[in-house]
Image (cartoon, helix red, strand yellow):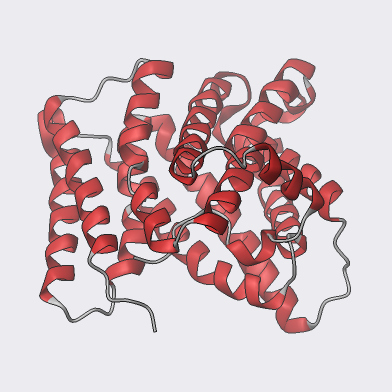
Amino acid sequence: MANVERVPSGPLSGSGFLKASARAFGAVPPPALVMLGIVSVQVGAAVAKQLFTHVGAMGTVTLRLALAAVVLLLVWRPSLRLDRRTWAVVAGFGLVLGAMNLCFYQAIVRIPLGAAVTIEFLGPLAVAVLGSRRWLDGLWALLAATGVVLLTRADGGLDLVGAGFALGAGACWAGYILLGAKLGSRTSDGRGLALAMAFGAVLVLPFGVAEAGSALLDPVVLIAGGAVALLSSVVPYSLELEALRRIPPRVFSILMSLEPAVAAVAGLVVLHEALRPAQWVAVCCVVLASVGATRYARPEV
């Protein structure tokens, strides 16, 4: 299965800040680091959903990207002297990053967090199996599709607009993975990522200001937005990088396949969003499809 981490390993290697994080977590087993990162992301999403009543979904996206960009720019201090092709990759990555977050937050306004992440996860799963001619990969795709159909129709189903936004987020996640590899090959350390995050924040800023206005500057909202940025971006990036240094990408991807289930649990615990039994079965279908596609993928050459 394609590497489905939220940040490509190339742009993040070599930072003193992240090296310090690596030393701090050096004694923690890599699978535990990945799981902590997944939990951090999903708890961050749950906290973000609670911000919706104050600044809306688009205001929350703006806070997350802008504050994460500030942290990354301070850590990496990237140069603006890039060639035209590199700027195109940075801009494309930032565009996908912004669109992915906008779609995802619009999805969780309308449907439970666990359902949204399950549908969104079709993006990286599609990257893993698309173009394959093996019947087994077709089986994983069919299992995932069955899970999503069951999820959207079981026991009254989901809001179709919300499900559509989750699908859009999944398409952006697929683009994120593909562009992330190019970003890693054209930039060093986390400098390209910092610029892309800033570009994405600038793109979503008009939407956030239009929806939230001056509420974005409320100190309490800024503190909550900072927590979302840390939980959803800075902390998991550091944990995932350290894990990737110590385990193969395929093992990492298998662990990441548990994300829809973790999201469903986070939604239940933090937001009290209970999925119906049939929807839990649907989540399990997508998780199994992702694990299977990863576990039995052809070795990379």
- The mark total stands at 0
Left or right of 154: which side holds 208?
A: right
Residue drawn at (43%, 17%) of the image: 270
Quarter containing the N terminus: bottom left
Task: Quadrant for residue 82, please give it.
Answer: bottom right
Residue drawn at (47%, 59%) of the image: 172
**Residue 21 x/y as whole percent:** 70, 42
Q: Is residue 27 above or below residue 172?
A: above
Quarter containing the C terminus: bottom left
**Residue 133 x/y as whole percent:** 18, 81
**Residue 198 x/y as whole percent:** 75, 53
Residue 17 in view:
yes
Task: Quadrant for residue 174, please give it.
Answer: bottom left
Residue drawn at (70%, 43%) of the image: 23
Q: Is residue 142 above or below residue 211?
A: below
Residue 210 in view:
no
Left or right of 215: which side holds 56?
A: left
Left or right of 91: which side holds 158?
A: left
Nearest to the observer: residue 13 or residue 68:
13
Q: Is residue 29 above or below residue 49?
A: below
Residue drawn at (28%, 79%) of the image: 131
**Residue 289 x/y as whole percent:** 21, 54
Task: Quadrant for residue 3, please give it.
Answer: bottom left
